[in-house]
Image: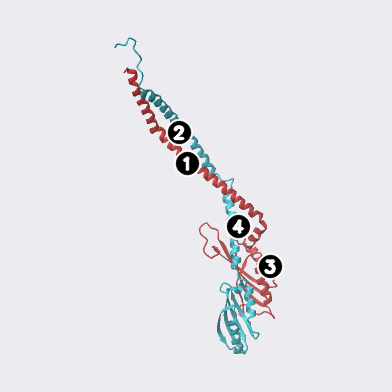
């Protein structure tokens, strides 16, 4: 059969679909190729602004505030710590008064707070009084150790001695 | 098939090739760089926000401290900034006078910066300076007890480190009056 009027050949359906698809894809690719460098420039500008903002801390005085707060907080915690550990020396003398024999005379004192020790130079008339004094010291709850030394018999009479007392930590509370 | 329809697949292939090449060689690297910058910008923004929040918190704390000005000044009196010797002498003299003792000599030594536990202050950290005040005071035993009470009540913080009197260093001067050697320990930041 010979066709008298030739018909236009129709494109295959794949070509009909693919061609506009390929055109659209190219359009997107071109648009993206233009868009991303533009967005990149925008973000680059943002980064520069943020970096500048981070560098510029002059208005905030952060370092100054930190220093003030740090100093005050250090002082506060330091003071609390010191107040908690401070030993009330008056209590040590009060404790000593309560255990001093009425016939013993202390002529010298060397009190050391940190060690909690009382070095006492004293005098008494007899060894008996000294023994009684030592017994009082040893019986006292506030005294943990008693060390007698430098026992001597001075020319003017009586007995001179040196005793080192270690006080219990609760004495200072 | 006519020529015009034969060239369409070639055109499609060419368009796809161009689109793909453009995407792979240009757009994709640009996109990655953009993402990187975006991430960087987000991070920086977060850092700015954190810093601003931190500044607000610091300001709140500072305002809170300012509201407690009276207490803060007591703390500052107890542990002052710097070692001011004239102020120290004044305090020592005041303590002696208020307890009825006579201050006959005074010497001060200032230690290195360290923490209150005694370890040296680490690099950059501001430590406390220990100030040792050695006093020679004349007075009675009752005056000594008053002095010890005054030290405890003083606005400036002092610890009594040692108390000594005896026939050698502090002989009895007149009836009931002794010379005491007292070592006080104070601190300054």
Instruction: Kindly indicate whether the residues beneath marks 2 and 4 are on one polypeptide chain.
Output: yes
User: Is the residue marked by circle 2 packed among few (<14), some (14-19), or many (20+) residues within 10 Å?
Assistant: many
Tell which circle, 2 or 4, labels the residue nearer the N-terminal end.
Answer: 2
Q: How many angstroms separate mark 1 from mark 3 (CA)?
A: 65 Å
- In percent of width and height, residue A114 lies at 57, 72
In front: mark 4 or mark 3? 4
Q: How many angstroms separate mark 2 from mark 3 (CA)?
A: 77 Å
User: Can you tell which chain is drawn cyan?
Assistant: A
In front: mark 2 or mark 4? 2
Q: How many angstroms separate mark 4 from mark 3 (CA)?
A: 26 Å
Read off the chain for label 3: B
Instruction: Kindly indicate whether the residues beneath marks 1 and 2 are on one polypeptide chain.
Output: no
Mark 4 highlights which residue? A72
Mark 1 highlights which residue? B39
- In percent of width and height, residue B4 lies at 34, 18
- Applied colour scheme: by chain
Q: In this view, does B51 lie to the left or right of B86?
A: left
Q: What element carries label 2?
A: helix
């Amino acid at each position: 059969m010979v066709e008298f009027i030739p018909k236009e050949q129709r494109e295959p359906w794949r070509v009909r679909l693919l061609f506009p698809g390929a055109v659209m894809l190219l359009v997107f690719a071109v648009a993206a190729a233009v868009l991303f460098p533009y967005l990149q420039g925008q973000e680059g500008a943002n980064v520069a602004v943020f970096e500048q903002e981070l560098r510029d801390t002059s208005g905030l005085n952060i370092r100054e505030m930190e220093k003030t707060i740090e100093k005050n907080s250090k002082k506060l915690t330091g003071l609390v710590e010191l107040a908690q550990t401070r030993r009330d020396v008056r209590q040590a003398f009060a404790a000593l008064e309560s255990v001093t024999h009425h016939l013993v005379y202390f002529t010298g004192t060397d009190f050391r707070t940190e060690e909690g020790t009382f070095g006492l130079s004293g005098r008494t008339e007899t060894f008996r009084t000294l023994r009684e004094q030592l017994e009082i010291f040893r019986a006292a709850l506030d005294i943990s150790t008693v060390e007698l030394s430098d026992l001597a018999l001075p020319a003017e009479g009586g007995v001179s001695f040196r005793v080192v007392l270690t006080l219990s930590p609760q004495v200072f509370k | 098939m006519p020529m015009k329809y034969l060239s369409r697949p070639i055109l499609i292939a060419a368009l796809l090739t161009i689109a793909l090449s453009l995407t792979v060689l240009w757009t994709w690297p640009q996109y990655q760089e953009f993402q990187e910058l975006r991430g960087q910008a987000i991070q920086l923004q977060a850092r700015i926000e954190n810093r601003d929040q931190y500044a607000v918190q610091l300001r709140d704390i500072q305002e809170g401290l300012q509201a407690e000005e009276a207490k803060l000044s007591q703390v500052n009196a107890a542990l002052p900034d710097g070692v001011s010797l004239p102020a120290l002498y004044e305090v020592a003299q005041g303590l002696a006078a208020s307890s009825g003792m006579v201050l006959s000599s005074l010497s001060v030594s200032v230690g290195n910066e360290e923490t209150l536990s005694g370890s040296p202050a680490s690099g950059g950290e501001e430590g406390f300076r220990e100030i040792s005040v050695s006093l020679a005071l004349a007075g009675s035993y009752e005056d000594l007890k008053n002095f010890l009470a005054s030290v405890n009540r003083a606005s400036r913080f002092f610890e009594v480190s040692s108390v000594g009197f005896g026939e050698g260093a502090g002989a009895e001067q007149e009836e009931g009056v002794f010379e005491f050697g007292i070592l006080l320990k104070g601190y300054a930041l």
